[in-house]
Image (tube, helix red, strand yellow):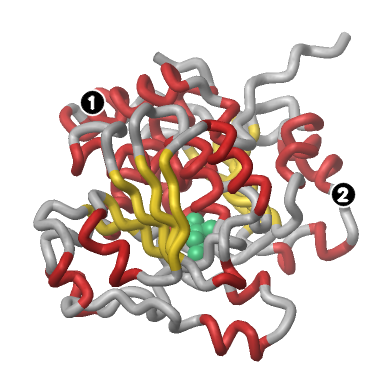
Amino acid sequence: MNKPKPRSVVSILDLTTDEINGLMNVADDIENNPDKYREKCKHKILSTIFFEPSTRTRLSFEAAMLSLGGSVISTADSQSSSAAKGESISDTVKVISNYADIIAMRHPKEGAPVVGAMKADVPVINAGDGGHFHPTQTLADLLTIRRTKGALSNLVIGLCGDLMFGRTVHSLIEAMLRYPNNKYVMIAPSELRLPEYIREELDKAGVDWEETESLEYAMPKLDVLYMTRVQKERFFNEEDYVRLKDTYILDEEKLKTAKPDLAILHPLPRVNEISVSVDDDPRAKYFYQTLCGKQMRMALIMFLLGIK
Ligand code: NCD
C-alpha cells in the first residue's frame, strides 16, 4: 500500500505565513536556549544531495542537523554521485529514502526538486534549483530582517544586482508579498531586470514598487538593501557576464546617503558587489545572515520531521 507522501518544501509558498512565523519563533528560541535542542534529532539522518556547487548552504544544512544531535550523509557533487552514470533523480531519491529521514537537494535544473519531492518517501527540502527558487535562503533572509528591523512590514526594500537569474531574490519577493505595507525598489541593469512573471505578481499584489538602474537614486529611501552577485553560471556568453558583473559595487561612499539603520543583506558568495570596507559598518548584516540561516534550517528540519 502506498504511504501518504510526507510534506516537502520546494517553494517558500509550500509554507503558510503562520508556519514561517512559527519557524522564526523556534529560531529565536534556539538562539536563546541552544541546549534544549541538542538532542532533538538524535538517531535521525539528513542526506544532502547537491548537483551544483555550494559551500555555505550545504554546510549550513549539515551544521543544522549536527546541532540537533542528528547525523548527515552526503554526496558533495554530481561528479562523485551516480548522476554522473546517468541515474534519474527519481531513482536517487527513492534509494536515499531508505537511508535517510530527510533530504536537502540542490539541482541546476529548475523543477528537479519537485520530482524529488514527488518520488521520495521522506521530506525533501529544495536547496536551490537553477534560477528558480531557494526557500531556505529566504527563511534566513526573513529572520535576518525580522531580527534587525523588528518586523517584516512597513519597510522599503531594495533588491540590487542580478534580479533576472537570482533565485534568492525570486523566493524572497514571493515571501515578502505576504507581509503588509512593504515597498520595493528593484535596482538592476535592464538586461538583468526581474523576470516578467514576478513583475506581474508584484502588479497583481497591488504593492508599491518601482524599477531603477541607479543604486544612488534608491539608497536614501531604503530600510533594507539586498545585494546579489551576477549569476555567472546562468549566462550564455562570457562577454555579457564581464560587461555586467561590476555594475553595482557597494562601498562606504555610496552608503553616505543611506539611512543610519539600513540593513545590508547578501545571500553570499560575494564576488565584487560589496567592498570589504563595508564589512565593518554596523549596517552590514550578511555574515549574521548565515547564522540566521543555520537556525532556520534547524527549525525547518524539526518541523518537517514532526519534532516539537
Ligand atoms: C545563493 C544561491 O545559491 O543561489 N547562495 C546561497 O545559497 N548562499 C546566491 C548565489 O549563489 O549567488
- Is the residue 14 above or below the residue 198 in the image? above
Three-letter code for the amino acid on which mark 1 is drawn: Asp
User: Where residue 22 sits in the image (x, y, percent)?
Assistant: 36, 20
Residue at 72% in and 63% down: 78
Q: Nearer the viewer, residue 208 or 282?
A: 208
Query: Considering the numbered disc 2 on the image, is that residue within a helix, a strand or a loop?
Result: loop
Q: Is mark 1 within 8 Å of ligand 1?
A: no
Q: Nearer the viewer, residue 305 or 11?
A: 11
Residue at 34% in and 49% down: 157
Mark number, residue 88? 2
User: Where residue 263 sits in the image (x, y, percent)?
Assistant: 22, 53
Q: Nearer the viewer, residue 159 or 108?
A: 159
Residue at 45% in and 17% down: 307
User: Where residue 72 sits in the image (x, y, percent)?
Assistant: 52, 44
Q: Is residue 151 left or right of residue 123?
A: left
For the image, the number of numbered tags is 2
Q: Earlier in the sequence, mark 1 or mark 2?
A: 1
User: Where residue 250 sits in the image (x, y, percent)?
Assistant: 29, 74
Three-letter code for the amino acid on which mark 2 is drawn: Ser
Alpha carbon of mark 1 to alpha carbon of mark 2: how far? 39 Å
Would residue 49 be seen by someone viewing this image from the given angle? no
Give the quadrant of the N terminus: top right
Residue linked to disc 1: 29
Q: Nearer the viewer, residue 255 or 47?
A: 255
Q: Is residue 117 left or right of residue 149?
A: right
- Is the residue 287 above or below the residue 24 in the image? below
Would residue 291 be seen by someone viewing this image from the given angle? yes
